[in-house]
Amino acid sequence: MGKIAAPDEVLYHIGISAQMIKGAKYALLPGDPGRVEALAKALGPAEPVGCHREYTSWLSQVEGEAVLVCSTGMGGPSVAIGMEELACIGIENFIRVGTTGSIQEKVALGDIVINKAAVRLDGTSQHYAPTAFPAVASLEITYALQQAAKDLEVPYHTGISVSSDTFWPGQERYDSFTGYVRKTLQGSLKEWQALGALNYEMETATLFVVAQSFGLKAASICGVVAKRTDSEQVAPADTYRLASERFQLVAKRALQDLIKAGK
């Protein structure tokens, strides 16, 4: 067992305490603070509990149990900081929910990607485990997400994410300020495609490695809002809404099943 904060201790970065989350063991982690309220309300009765820096938190109810929704901002460092403090107030299960760009033709806009593992193109995870250590999800939570998507008839794909610290060069995008991508990253998109990776995003590798190093559980579910095999552009607002609605529904069903099963 790691360090546990006093019940009334408000943690510096996340701005909440164990008392405020009422025994919650699950946390959904969107990146965008603006997504928190809608996601919490989609789960059930919800109320705000804290807002500090990029960490906006709401507490919801699923099957009579408290579930925390806490934003993390973009990228690995803020994910790791949030997880450190959330673990100290009693969170044991972390589920990243967000958006992603697909890199395989079969993964369409609006589909759901459930990542079972991640390529560690981040820097943060290397501060928790050596690069040879795999970034892998909880099988239990991942299976619950898969089953929920099947039950709800939501189109989904399970596979490996390429988790990058940067939005442009690390994901081999050339529409940046300079248009320059380091030579070591040029051609990397085709390599990841050839290896069967499904998507690019910026948080999952950190999430998986940090959770594993803590002896806790993590999973990741994202809605596809960019299809790199067609365009570099983000999808229209209606597709973005569809992807968001789908990952909300799937996450809720998975949580219901996990909580009912006492897991």
Image: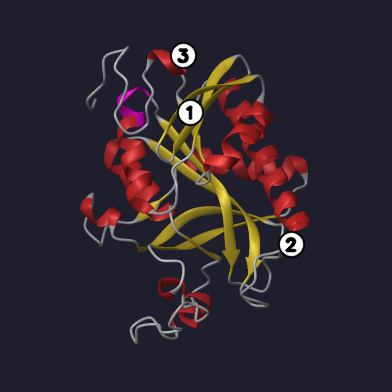
Q: Nearer the viewer, mark 2 or mark 1?
A: 2
181 displayed left or right of 156: left
CA distance for labels 2 and 3: 38 Å
Q: Which residue is mark 2?
A: 236
Residue 87: within the magenta?
yes
Q: Nearer the viewer, residue 232 or 141?
A: 232
Classify mark 3: helix, strand or loop.
Answer: loop
Residue drawn 48% across the image and 77% down it: 176
Q: Nearer the viewer, residue 141 or 11?
A: 11
Q: Which residue is mark 3?
A: 22
- Specify start and end residues of the magenta stretch as a single range: 86-90
Three-letter amino acid code at the position of disc 3 = Lys
Q: Is residue 109 shown above or below 193? A: above
Whole-percent x, y for residue 35 in the image: 59, 41
Q: Nearer the viewer, mark 2 or mark 3?
A: 2
Classify mark 2: helix, strand or loop.
Answer: loop
Quadrant location of the N terminus?
top left
Whole-percent x, y for residue 190 in the image: 50, 82
CA distance for labels 3 and 1: 11 Å
Q: Which residue is mark 1?
A: 26
